[in-house]
Amino acid sequence: MELTAGISLTRLEIGLLERAKSRLGEAVLDPGQWSSLMEAICGAAATTGAALLQSDVRTPDVPMTPSVADLLRDYFDNNLHVGDIRAARGMPLILSGRSVVRDQDMFQSETVMLRDPLYATLTRFRFRWFSGISFQSGPAMWVMTLQRTIREGMFDDAELRALGSLSETLTEVATLSHAVGKQVLLGTLNAFELINEPAISVSSTGLVIGLNRAATDLFDADFRVRNSRLYMRDGKASQALERLLWERPRDSEIRLPSRGRVGNVIVAGRESKKPILIRVLPVHGAASTPFLGARAILVLRDLEAERRPPLEILSEVFSLTIAEARVASKIAAGSSPDEIADALHISRETVRNQIKAIFGKTGTHRQSELAALVARIQI
């Protein structure tokens, strides 16, 4: 069957598309909105699912609608992203000035199209027809992919023109998201600096996006940034971090699979010094925008350095017991209640009660407030 730009079985609704377009700015401060925003676009375009993919660096931690989650998991697990024929044939068209591409632009017939392994996978998930809306975030080219089922039919010319109107707005939103996210991430790294915690932000591919001065101060021949990536002489630690960053999270947390009880901590050994402990934290809020690419914040603890939390001072200043001061110090350093209970060999209920007492005595309500307060009396 020849692929032609005929009339599809379902039609795009302009009014609904304009409404969805007007809401795209919501994703600047809350990247978690992307899924629902794309669902609104899908509803307007009579399309089952959507996702955001970068043209040259495709990673599994991208925003997507739940309807294509299983498809994209298979797409990445089977390395279909490496030789994606849509990217190979579609990007030259986009670079030539097209704001939207579709199957008919890349294949002469449906028979030829279905011979490609990607389309065989799509068929298994009852998908077939595609259109991609191009947009930019700085020098990076992105595509919002819209995926229709076999029954929904291919995208026609009128629908393509309507979808093209999203390209400019998506570029504006992506550009602003990158700028806002970068400032928020910088503020987070500076907050760790205030409590003398070395911290590095990295992408899912291990690219270093930002770091604070405390992190730079502990670099040596075994642990440093090289070619914009974190280099560790300890190969096992490097592999553990790489696996953790690449794995697409099912929620907002990052968890390190382990038989032991180290939680989300990687131990990076060094040749002639004590190890560095790397605590892996998720990126939240505007800093988690896909256009910045920050996947995690690595909080570093150099076991070679002497760190003596001023427990007596904390106790005296805020009228805390020594036990409460010990918990307060760990909260300020970013430890979770469960981690504190494990580290101090006390029950979780005891930790929760002590945290309530600490917040009451210090007049704080959140971990970030307590961290900033403790930072002011560090000596």
Image (cartoon, rainbow, N blue to C red):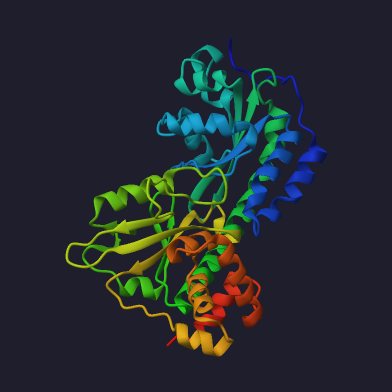
Q: Left or right: 39 with respect to 293? A: right
Residue 199: quarter of image:
bottom left
Can you say whether 367 is above or below 363 in the image?
above
Q: Left or right: 103 with respect to 342? A: right
| Outermost residue toward the right in this view | 15
Q: Is residue 227 visible?
A: no
Across and down, in percent, residue 278 comes to 37, 61
Nearer to the camera, 92 or 45: 45
Nearer to the camera, 235 or 86: 235
Residue 83: quarter of image:
top left
Across and down, in percent, residue 191 comes to 51, 74
Q: Is residue 211 visible?
A: yes
The C terminus appears in which quarter of the rendering? bottom left
The residue at 69%/19% (across/down) is 6
Across and down, in percent, residue 243 comes to 38, 45
The residue at 72%/20% (across/down) is 7
The residue at 65%/60% (across/down) is 29
Can you say whether 50 is above or below 238 in the image?
above
Nearer to the camera, 3 or 330: 330
Can you say whether 235 is above or below 216 in the image?
above
Nearer to the camera, 360 or 6: 360
Q: Left or right: 103 with respect to 6? A: left
The N terminus appears in which quarter of the rendering? top right
Q: Left or right: 124 with respect to 361? A: left
Across and down, in percent, residue 295 comes to 48, 54
